[in-house]
Amino acid sequence: MGIQDNQPLSSGARQGRPPEEVLSSVIHELESFQRDVQQDLSQDIQRLQRDKHQLIQEVEQLRQEQENLRFQRIQTLSERQISQQQVWLKQLAQLLASNVQRELILRINQGRSGHQPLLEVDPEGVLLPGTEANADLPSEELEAVLNSSLNQTFRELQKELNSYQSDLSERLVHMQSLEQQVEALLEAVVNRLRGQLDNQGTQLEPEQPTSNILQPTPRPLPPRPTTTPKPSQPIVTPPPSQIQKNSRVQLGLILAFLSAITLSVFNVCIKILLKSSEPRQIFGVFDVTGVIAPGIGNSLLILLLRMIVVMALMPIVATLLYPAVWNDLQRFLKSGDRALMRTVIGSGFFLFLSQVSIYIALGEIRTGIAITIFFIYPIVTVFASWALFGDRPSWIRIAAMSLIIMGAVLSLPNLLGTGPIAFGNPQLGVTASVMAGITFAGYVLLTQIAAGKLHPIPFSLVNFAAIFVFSAVSLIGIGLLSNFVSLPQGVSVMIAPDVGQGLMIGGIILGILTLCSYLLNNFAIRNAGAALASIIATTGPALTALFAWLIIGEKLSVLQVFGMLLVISGVAAMSLERMFLTQKKAKA
């Protein structure tokens, strides 16, 4: 029976088993096989982990032994060096002692001129010459001679040390005077280069300071003679370099004009984002009511959304324009020049205040009028330069400032009951525009102070970062303050729940327009120079009013348009005078 029980079932018995039982037995066998494999693998993994830990411990022990051997070797070498140094010091001390001994004996013997030398030099010590003859010499006389000789020797040594000290002091004073002269010379050179960088954009490439290549100064053509030229004289054609330079200038002017157009469209986009009591139509087709109400808190929110886009793309743009931007920033942060850091951060703070103020103004008055009043900043710049740098304004500047003031007054909203009224609070809008111009003048002055110390592209990157930080901190402060105090409606941040998507799209558009305007202006300065680019930029108010009329149908009165033209003429006259003065200084 036992043998028959251990025999496998016959084929008929297997065929008689149901499929479910066969399947369950197969599954059971697979599970048992899986458990066995898992157990074997886990044991292998544990064994490998133990081997790994053991190998790590052995490696650590080997490293420790290596460090110990290295330390012992260094210690052995240091002990040998110390013993060798002690031997050398001992030999040096013996040599110095023998030299001092010889010098003292010579000085003592010089005091007994005409007599037999009192002492003689012996390799084993100091001996008295003629021991038998000097045996009767009194000890008091010998002590007196030694004292007088030693005192005289020490006095002479002291005189020599004093002479050396006076000579060193004179040399130090001379070196200090030379250092002051070099500092004054370097300061004069830096001021001269700074003036050329500020005023002569056509001669210096400001965006590539690493090359330090100055373009040749264009000279005026000689006056045309009244008599006709002789037929034998050849016709002078301009060189290819001059033609290429003229084409670059034309390209720069076109890029500067495109930059001004981009800024004008930027201002109109801000106007579209801000709500108004009057209905607006984009190109006379789409009705737009605005996304967010004008105010301080909402202006900060728009500025923050714009700066998020700018700070996300500006590092890439800055690296493409100036590959050494990060090295300059690292050098700027590690320089420890607190004055320069305060200047750069202060310029960013003034630009931040200017942006917030112009956003508030655009929400209260018409776009072209707000930008026109903003362009009073050259007046503030002139008076501040006079007070800070002693740059006294000329009669041309005074006349230009008079035109700017007259034009700003004529372009005020609803002046004498004429012209279109403002959208909201005209007094607040005008005040915000004036504040924007004043703070922008502070930004310009601090930028001039920092010119030459930091490249323009790292400077712009730090300014954008400062605006981003100031906007975020201001919004956080308003949010925290609103939890404790009931803020006015224009100060707090008030947005509707359903305008988040439109607000984000508006921030992206504003950020892209900012970078486009920056790039166009950058390439315009490279090709045409800063002076010509600034002259083209004076068309900002007119272009803003034009695009505001074309896009959202804003209209201005004839008096306001005349005032705008006066402002543009005054600003352009100041830019032209600066350019001509720069060319005259360059020729001199």
Image (cartoon, helix red, strand yellow):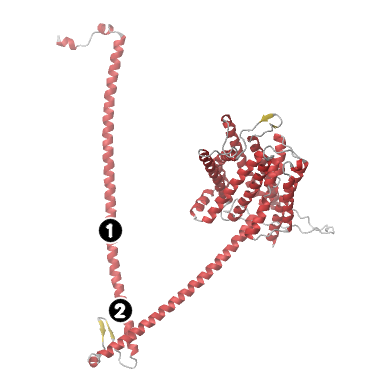
Is the residue 379 above or below the residue 413 in the image?
Answer: below
Disc 2 marks a residue whose amino acid type is Ser
The CA distance from mark 2 to mark 1 is 34 Å
**Quadrant in which the C terminus appears:** bottom right
Q: Residue at x 78, y 56 (%)?
A: 234
Disc 1 marks a residue whose amino acid type is Gln
Q: Position of residue 262 (x, y in %)?
A: 66, 41
- Secondary element type, mark 2: helix
| Label 1 crowd (10 A; few <14 / some 14-19 / many >=20) | few
Q: Position of residue 431 (x, y in %)?
A: 66, 45
Specify the label residue 373 is tagged with.
Answer: none
Q: Residue furthest right?
A: 227
First of labels 2, 1 by sequence position: 1
Is 68 displayed left or right of 392 in the figure?
Answer: left
Is the residue 573 above or below the residue 140 in the image?
Answer: above
Specify the label residue 75 is tagged with.
Answer: 1
Rendered image quadrant of residue 2? top left
Q: Are the residues flagged by discs 2 and 1 in contact, CB closer than 8 Å?
A: no
Q: Position of residue 556 (x, y in %)?
A: 74, 39
**Quadrant in which the N terminus appears:** top left
Residue receiving disc 2 = 98
